[in-house]
Image (cartoon, grey):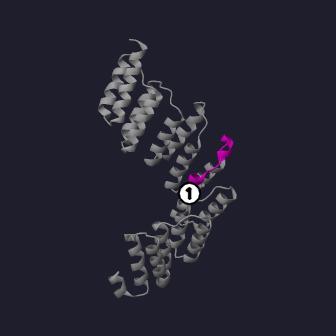
Amino acid sequence: MCDSSSRVFDSLFKTYVHMKKFRNATDVFCQMKDYGFLPTVESCNKYISSLLDLNRVDIAFGFYKEVWRCRISSNVYTLNMVIGAFCKSGKIENAVEVFKEIERMGFSPTIASYNTLIAGYCNKALLSSAVKLKKSMGKDSLQPNVITFNTLIYGFCKEGKLQEANRMFSEMKSMNVTPNILTYNTLINGFSQTGNSEMGGRLYEDMVRNGIKADILTYNALILGLCKVGKTKKAAYLVKDLDKGNLVLTASTFSALITGQCMRKNSENAFQL
């Protein structure tokens, strides 16, 4: 068969992937192998990506192994997806092996490679490994970005290590990486969960000074922090701010307010809420 046949098969393979007709795509892939053709790495990446989007992780792994067996040259994007899939499945050791494979194949890890593995470490509460990996970015001429820091801050907050999270926040600013709404919300929520409404308030003020507009998640976290220490009047003022900002109260807002009233042993007001 001529070279154009290979392109036709590859185009058909991509079309089935785009349509989420994975069985048909697999059939075309098998036919291509029978005729001595192989899809491009870009087509294979699209197939793996589509499977992962639908949480079909096992099938994605199976296809990746087939890509490897067929000697289709993977690229960094392929490997980043596989790292993410292993991390999502909790198979951090496998993710680390694929990360090492990037360099063995002659590529350099990208910021996405690092951020994905850092997120995997944080999800497993392996925070020292996550920080160590962040520090090693320099050898690939990379610097942590807002995603890197947000991931680490969330990891520390989730484990209740607020001092470390705040230290990471300070490092972030010292490296001229601009915090975003997610950074502030994560920290405010972390401190609020421990009842440190004062620190939550300071972070909120810093956020406003930097021109970042609070959203419902910011307010929910602030209200929770105030209610946890029984400052329900201040929390009520924030609820009024919500109305002014055209933000809609959520179940989390009401839950925080009820917590505050119950802590003040004001069950009647709690039921009214």
Residue 93 location in percent, x, y?
51, 44
Amino acid at the residue labelled 1: Asn
Q: Is residue 43 among what the camera can see?
A: yes
220 w.r.t. 59: above or below: below
| Image quadrant in which the C terminus is located | bottom left
Our reading of the magenta stretch's main secondary structure is helix
Q: Of residues 251 and 129, which is closer to you in this image?
A: 251
Residue 188, image quadrant: bottom right
Which of the 4 quarters of the picture holds residue 23? top left
At 41% from the left and 84% from the top, the residue drawn is 261
Where is 98 relative to 197, above or below? above
State the residue at coordinates (38%, 17%). 5
Where is residue 260 drawn, in percent x and y?
Answer: 43, 81
Residue at image x 39%, y 79%?
A: 258
Q: Position of residue 86 (x, y in %)?
A: 46, 44
| Dot 1: element | helix
- The residue that mark 1 highlights is 150
Q: Which residues are magenta?
A: 136-148
